[in-house]
Every structure is written in structure tokens, then in C-alpha cells.
Amino acid sequence: MELFLIVLFYLCLFFPVLHLLHCLPWFAVQEEKEKNNPDKEKGISILIPCYNEAGIIETSVNSMKSLAYQNFEVIYVNDGSTDSTFKLLNKFLNLEKCWRMPLNKLDHQEVESIYQSKICPNIFVVNKVNGGKADALNAGIEFSSKEIVITLDADTVLTESALTTVNDKFDDENVVAAGGMVHVLQTKTKNPLSRLSISRANILVRVQMLDFLKAFYITKISLARFQGLAIISGAFGIFNKNLLIEVGGYRSSVGEDIDITLKIQRYISKKKNKKKRVILIDDAIGYTELPETWRDLFKQRIRWQKGYVDCLIYFLPFLVRTLFTRSVSFFYIIESFTVAVFAGYVTLGIFIYSAVINFSLTLLSFIILYLLYIVLFNFIYDLLVLKQVKRYGFSFHKKDRFRLFITIVYDIFVHRFVTMYFVMFGSIAYFFNKDWKKVARTGRNYGTDVAS
């Protein structure tokens, strides 16, 4: 037992230290620095599945109208909304019916009608029977006409230069999928490529902001350098369209975002595709809205964890077979499962055993060390990520310093342990209920209501 706990504890130490070091600029790979400067714009189709998105749709439409790119189209997939989503799309876009032929390659629920905007002819609306997010994305792929597909949540807005950056990276024919960098919409300012603000965000949004910054600017950067990205953020995913069709599109599941990435990783693991790559585009920036209440945060995080478990089970043969040959499999099983999930259950089990059945100094020492590890490494992560985002061109106003300090304290002493609960609860809840509940939108207009 002692040897098992020692090995587990050192695993818990190894991965945070690895990512802390590997995300630093000393370990940057050549592809991050390269600029391809393509002669022409590749065609880009932006797919936005919408189910009851009335509260955020105006912000989304305004964002799509402001993009500094020519060769792109936007396809809103109205997935059987029961609120005023379609009416608002018609109001902001002045829709008229049009005709488009589907590819007939991917399955999805019936499409009732297709519309084109009279105001912005490159924006379309696919009106269909409700089938879930994966089904809506498959329908969007079917009716898209460009070679690159970007998938966005309805509450995600892109910065003006995002598509130009995507075009540059996809000029490399070996890049088949990518993820953009996603910031928190509640922290967006009038200078979205250089300034963040938490002056209008509550403590719950602020601590989630730290989660996002750590996920993208530490963990994802490190994993991308290892070619080990298992999750391309559902808020801003970028794909070669032909590859999406070749892997069968999206699988209807609670974890469709992770699922499509693992499908692609499985595809490029084949010998004939060994040069193909999944990358992180650190200067393609998007902003997505995060939950502002505990109720909505709980729904979101439980869904994320159910998605992880769903894909772990579905892709287990591939992950086990390539455990020591593909970095994505190694990190998905050894880090994400053993350290993030299994260690939490072990700690809880030891605590209950020691408290109720048989007190042991060794077991108590493991619990104390594990809790200290959580506090210490999250404190280091919080400090490092503030340096990291500055290195990538972002900064906070001086008046935000005290709020950041309070947020960091709250993160390491409260939120880390709440997150452990989300992981443990979601992992078990998956086996009893695979459904997920929609997070409420704030209804705020982020086109005008942003900090300076």
C-alpha cells in the first residue's frame, strides 16, 4: 500500500511540473514561430449550432459581421429551438429561403428549410428538427461549401483577425485540425487582443477565467508541443472539412467535442497519415461566455466530466493500444484519468477508511501531502499563468490586481476542492444519466457592454 501511494503521489507531482516547464518559451516548437503568409484566402465555413440561444444571438451575429476576412460563410443551425432564436435571426439578418444541396455523407435529423441573409449574403440559417449539438454540426457540415470548417458555440465571438490567422496555419497541408485560444467573454474589453478586465465579473466568473487561462496557456500549449491534444475546445474548433467527413462526422454523445478530436487523433495515428498534425493556434483568439451562477457551473462541469468518461469508454481500445506510442493516449489515460480522477477517489477512500475503520499515520500523511500538493501547485499555476498571458500579449489593468489576488486565494482554498467534487460526481453520474442540461445565457449584449 505504501509503495502504491508513493507512486501515485509522484505521478501527481510529475505532470504539473512537466506542463509548468514545457509551456515556457524555451520549449517552443518550430511550427509555432512559422508564418506561412499564403497568397490567397482559403474558404472557411463557420458552423454555429443553436438551440434556444435567444439570449446571446445578437452578440453572435454582430461578431460574424465584424470579421476581417472575405472568403467565408456562416451557417447558423437552428436545432429545433422553442424560444425566439429563429425570429431574432430573421430580425438581425432579414432572411429569405434559398436552395442548397447537401453532401449526403453524414446522418442528421430532417432539415425543414434553408435561409440566406439579404443583409449579409454569406450568412445562412439551416432550420431543422432537434437532434442535439452533434446532429446540428453534422447538418452544418452537410450544407457547408468551404474547405475549412470552424465550429463555434453560439456564445463564442471571434476577434477580427482570427480567420486570417487560421488561414495562415492551414496553409500547411499537414495541419488537419486545430484549436483556437479561448478567453472569457465577461472579461472582454474594447481591446480584445491585448487587454482583459475582471471589473464586471463576479468571483465565480473570475475563478473560471483562471481555469481557462491555465487550461489554454499552460496545459494545452504543453500538450500541443507533445502532439497530445485530446480536446479541441468546442467553443473554437477548426477542421479540414474532408477529414470530418472521412472520420464520420460527430457522434451523438455527451462529449462530442472530445469525441471528434479523438477520432482525428485515431485517424492520424495510422502509418500513412503520420505527417498529419493537430495544433493549437495561439494567436487565433475567441471569447466565450461562462456560467455566472453555481447552478449553471454545476451543469457545465458535470457535462464536461461525463463527456470525458464517455470518450474514455468509447475509445478505450485505441487508447490502450497506443498508450506508449501516441502521446494523446498517454496523457488521456495516465494524466487525465489516473491523476485527475483516480487519485481523488483514492484520497477520499483513504480519508473515510482512516476516520471510520482504522487510523493510520501513513494514510493520514498521504492525505495531507495530497492536499498540500493541490494548494501549492494551483498557487504556482495561478502565478505562472498571469506571466504567460502577458508573454502572449495580454494584460490586466492595475485596478484589477486586488481582485486577482482575492480570486487566486479563493481558487486555491475553495474552487480547487469544488472542482474535485465536479470530477468525482460527474464520473459516477455518467453511468446513471448520460443527458446534459443547457447552461442559461445571460442575455447581455457584449457588442456594447464591455470594459475599456
Image: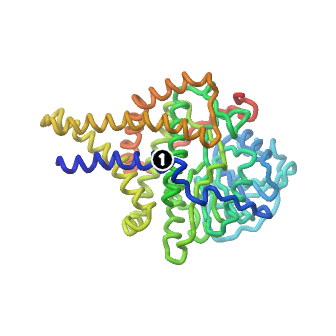
As drawn, 427 above or below 197: below
**Coloration mode:** rainbow
Q: Is residue 231 left or right of residue 281?
A: left
Residue ID at (53%, 78%): 272
Q: Is residue 113 left or right of residue 435?
A: right
Image spot of residue 2 (x, y percent):
17, 47
As drawn, 353 above or below 145: above
Find residue 134 and report its image quarter: bottom right
As drawn, 123 above or below 397: below
Residue sticking out furthest to the left: 358
Circle 1 Cα neighbour tier, 10 Å, few/some/many (<14 / 14–19 / ≥20): many
Work out whether residue 118 or residue 359 is closer to the camera in this orientation and state it.
359
Image mark count: 1
Residue ID at (18%, 32%): 355
Instruction: Confirm whether residue 254 shows in the render.
Output: no
Instruction: Confirm whether residue 447 shows in the render.
Output: yes
Regarding mark 1 in the picture, which secondary structure is present there?
helix
Image spot of residue 23 (x, y percent):
50, 48
Image spot of residue 449 (x, y percent):
72, 29
User: Looking at the figure, which quarter contains the C terminus?
Assistant: top right
Residue ID at (67%, 71%): 104
Residue sticking out furthest to the front: 26
Residue assigned mark 1: 304
Residue ID at (71%, 50%): 162
Residue sticking out furthest to the right: 118
Question: Which residue type carries mark 1?
Answer: Trp
Find residue 34 and report its image quarter: bottom right
Work out whether residue 87 or residue 343 is closer to the camera in this orientation and state it.
343
